[in-house]
Image: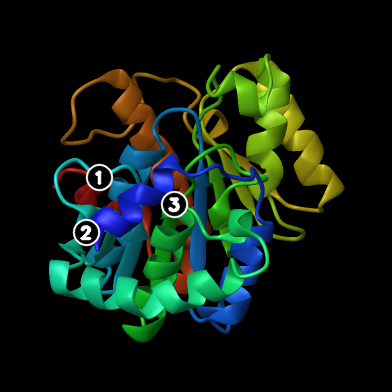
């Protein structure tokens, strides 16, 4: 199963979400069966996802988490309450998706889902079937055209903006910020982590156009780093990720019964 998935990395790929749209449509949209918190960013998104997952889980929720890349096992990418997807589950999901992938590619080989698209679909299927209460979903590349951007989230988060993937996303911070702001959906609140002012202004512009309320980590902690929350991870940058997590807990508080005290306790785990 892994050999099949990894072989897809060597194929030519079309940058965009048309193939992912077709894939989730063929699967009857498993991504719509649970609330999603969608996370993009140049740096910090993996740490933020882990921190927010801990906060949500501490509140008693069944939490899915879809992240990349993995360090040792493929199953690290798809977790429920921090339990990795087993090798057996991966094999079963791959066997289920191969015929569908071949069907989608029947007319044009370039319509065959990519490695990341299939992993994303596997995550959505797993979360749907296991009936998670909420899923934290991390983008792979950028935001606007990322495979994960087929979701309709309850909250969007952009942890940071820096110069990354210049060939695909643009050569300056404003262009990259606009691509990452592609995860912002109409009427869905968006959280902005610490980032350069030019990037922040672009995300705010996109959010205003889509009538999405904006919450800023830097506004919540005006005396940083002195008032930043403490986390079990080292580094001031991790405390900024923790700050974004506390803000997310506040925004999600009413829906999931979260509060700042619970969030700060979970960050120390």
Q: Residue at x 62, y 48 (%)?
A: 190
Whether tag 1 and tag 3 are in contact, CB under 8 A, the answer is no
Residue placed under numbered mark 3 in the picture? 116
Label 1 environment density (alpha carbons within 10 Å; few <14, some 14–19, many ≥20):
few
Residue lying at 47% horizontally and 51% vertically, measured from the top left: 248
Q: Report which quarter residue 81 is drawn in.
A: bottom left
Q: How far apart, in angstroms, are the residues tagged by discs 3 and 2?
A: 13 Å
Residue drawn at x 51%, y 71% as measured from the top left: 102
Q: Residues within 10 Å of mark 3 (few under 14, many from 20)?
A: many
Q: From the viewer's side, name the closer residue of 69 and 43.
A: 69
SS label for mark 2: helix
Which tag is nearer the camera, tag 3 or tag 2? 3
Q: Is residue 238 left or right of residue 218?
A: left
Q: Position of residue 119 (x, y in %)?
A: 39, 59
Badge number at residue 214: none
Element marked by disc 1: loop
Q: Which residue is mark 1?
A: 70
Above-or-below relation of 169 to 268: above
Residues at circles 1 and 2 in contact by the CB criterion of under 8 Å: yes
Inter-mark Cα distance, 1 to 2: 8 Å
Q: Residues within 10 Å of mark 2 (few under 14, many from 20)?
A: many
Q: Return the disc, 3 or 2, that comes first in the chain's sequence.
A: 2
């Amino acid at each position: 199963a892994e050999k099949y998935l990894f072989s897809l990395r060597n194929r030519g790929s079309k940058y965009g979400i048309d193939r992912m749209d077709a894939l989730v449509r063929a699967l009857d949209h498993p991504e719509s069966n649970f609330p999603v918190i969608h996370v993009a960013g140049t740096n910090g998104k993996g740490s933020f996802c882990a921190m927010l997952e801990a906060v949500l889980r501490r509140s008693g929720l069944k939490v899915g988490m879809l992240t990349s890349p993995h360090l040792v096992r493929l199953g690290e990418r798809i977790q429920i309450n921090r339990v990795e997807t087993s090798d057996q589950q991966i094999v079963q999901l791959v066997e289920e998706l191969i015929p569908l992938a071949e069907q989608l590619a029947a007319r044009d080989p370039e319509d065959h889902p990519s490695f990341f698209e299939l992993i994303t679909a596997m995550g959505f299927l797993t979360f749907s079937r296991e009936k998670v209460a909420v899923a934290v979903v991390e983008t792979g590349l950028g935001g606007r055209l990322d495979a994960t951007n087929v979701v309709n989230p309850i909250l969007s988060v952009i942890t940071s903006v820096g110069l990354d993937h210049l060939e695909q996303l643009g050569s300056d911070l404003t262009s990259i910020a606009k691509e990452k702001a592609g995860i912002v959906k109409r009427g869905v609140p968006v959280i902005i982590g610490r980032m350069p002012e030019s990037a922040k202004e672009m995300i705010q512009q996109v959010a205003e156009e889509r009538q999405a309320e904006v919450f800023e980590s830097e506004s919540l902690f005006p005396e940083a780093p002195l008032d930043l929350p403490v986390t079990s991870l080292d580094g001031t940058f991790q405390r900024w990720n923790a700050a974004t997590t506390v803000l997310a807990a506040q925004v999600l508080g009413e829906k999931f019964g979260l509060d700042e005290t619970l969030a700060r306790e979970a960050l120390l785990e």
